[in-house]
Amino acid sequence: GIEFVVGVYDTPMTRIYARIGWCPEVLARARPEFGNITAGIWEATPAVLSTMRQRLAARLRGRPVLVT
């Protein structure tokens, strides 16, 4: 199965990823003249995916989600 996901994203998305429990490890950041862009790697382990599912379910039920 998939163990890691590598991607390029707008740096402000880091907050969103933290809210869903899927924080990337930063691999590189673009120079300012290229924009606010970051390359990162995310774990895709069963534990991480379970956390994301739980947080999504809680949000869909309208309950606040605790971010630790």
Image (cartoon, rainbow, N blue to C red):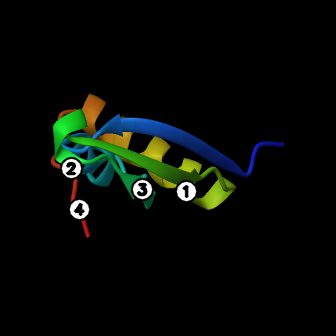
Q: What element carries label 4?
A: loop
Q: Mark 4 points at which residue?
A: 67
Query: Which amino acid does the dot numbered 2 rest on?
Result: Arg
Q: Earlier in the sequence, mark 4 or mark 3?
A: 3
Please provide percent x and percent y for residue 18. Answer: 29, 54
In this view, the residue farthest toward the bottom is 68
Q: Distance between the residues labelled 3 and 2?
A: 17 Å
Query: Which amino acid does the dot numbered 3 rest on?
Result: Ala
Within 10 Å of disc 1 (Cα), the crowding (few <14, some 14-19, many 20+) is some
Residue drawn at (42%, 56%) of the image:
28
Residue drawn at (22%, 52%) of the image:
65
Query: Which amino acid does the dot numbered 1 rest on?
Result: Val
Q: Name the residue under label 3.
A: 28
Which circle, 1 or 3, is nearer the viewer? 3
Q: Is mark 3 on a helix, strand or loop?
A: strand
Q: Mark 1 points at which residue?
A: 48
Q: Earlier in the sequence, mark 1 or mark 3?
A: 3
Please provide percent x and percent y for residue 45. Answer: 67, 56
Do we see residue 35 in this rendering? no
Residue 44 relative to residue 2: left or right: left
- The label shown at residue 15 is 2
Please provide percent x and percent y for residue 47. Answer: 61, 60
Residue 18 relative to residue 45: left or right: left
Q: Which of marks 2 and 1 is nearer the N terminus?
A: 2
Q: How far apart are marks 2 and 1 (CA)?
A: 16 Å
